[in-house]
Every structure is written in C-alpha cells, then in structure tokens.
Image (tube, grey):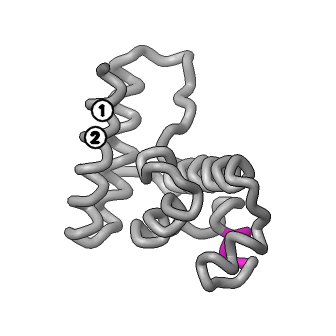
Amino acid sequence: MVSKRQMAEFTRALGRRIATLRVNAGLTQQALAEHLDSAISVVSRMENGGALPSITRLVEMADIFGVEVSEFFLFEIPTNVTTDDKAETVAKRLAALLRLMSPDDTELVVRIVEQLARRLRK
C-alpha cells in the first residue's frame, strides 16, 4: 500500500513535471488555465502538488503542450537504490495511482506506459 507521504511525493513530482512542460511550451499559468477553460488556481494547485489531475486533464495538457501523455511520468528516481528497488518503487507508485482511477483511465495509462517502454527499448 502506498503511504500518504509517498502519494504526496508523487503528486509534487507530477506537478513539477507539468510546470516544466508548460514552461517548455512557452505558456504562463494563466495561458494554460485559459486553454483548459479553468481557473489559474487550478493550474497552480496541480503544479504545486496540491491537486492530482485526471487522466482526461493530462490528455488535454499533452495536446496543448504538443507532447505524449507519457511525458508527464518521466520523473527522476533516486540513484541510491538498486535497479530492482527502483522497479519495485515505480511499480508501487503506478499501482497506487491506478487504484484511484476509473477502469477506462487505468487502461489508457497502461497503454501509455507500454508505448513508452517500447520506445525506450529502441
């Protein structure tokens, strides 16, 4: 089971990644909020780890940023653990997220991760 601390760490890491992709796309928080037909406070909460975006929202942002949805999940993993520990940590983090999603969103995430894995093997 994923602890609240681990979930909070994941949410913050995802938020940092959203902010990085937004900046790389040349957008302000205000501009992204307008594209999403949302309030700037919603964008701010996502980027600061105060809110976890839905898969639908991630798909919308990926389209706006011109990236694949899998780009949101490219976080750094601490290098002081073994490869097996890294794989187990990532698997646990993904499993925790998948438990929070609808079956359709879960299937979408699985397909995205599979696609990313195939690309990284090349």
Q: Residue 41 placed where, x, y %?
A: 74, 78
Alpha carbons under labels 2 and 1: distance apart: 5 Å
Vertical relation: 25 (above or below) 56:
above
Quarter placement of the C terminus: top left
Q: Residue 114 placed where, x, y %?
A: 25, 40
Vertical relation: 105 (above or below) 113:
below
Q: Is residue 85 magenta?
A: no
SS for callout 1: helix
User: Circles 2 and 1: CB distance less than 8 Å?
Assistant: yes
Vertical relation: 19 (above or below) 55:
above
Is 104 displayed left or right of 2 in the figure?
A: left
Q: Is most of the magenta stretch helix, strand or loop? A: helix
Q: Is residue 42 magenta?
A: yes
Vertical relation: 107 (above or below) 80:
below
Is 24 displayed left or right of 66 in the figure?
A: right
* Residue 64: quarter of image: bottom right
Q: Name the residue beneath numbered marker 1.
A: 117
Q: Residue 51 placed where, x, y %?
A: 59, 69
Looking at the picture, which amino acid does disc 1 mark?
Answer: Ala
SS for callout 2: helix
Q: In the image, which residues are magenta? A: 41-45
Q: Residue 86 placed where, x, y %?
A: 41, 25
Looking at the picture, which amino acid does disc 2 mark?
Answer: Gln
Q: Are there few (<14), some (14-19), or many (20+) residues within 10 Å of tag 1? A: few
Q: Residue at x 34, y 66 (%)?
A: 100
Q: Name the residue beneath numbered marker 2.
A: 115
Q: Residue at x 74, y 61 (%)?
A: 27
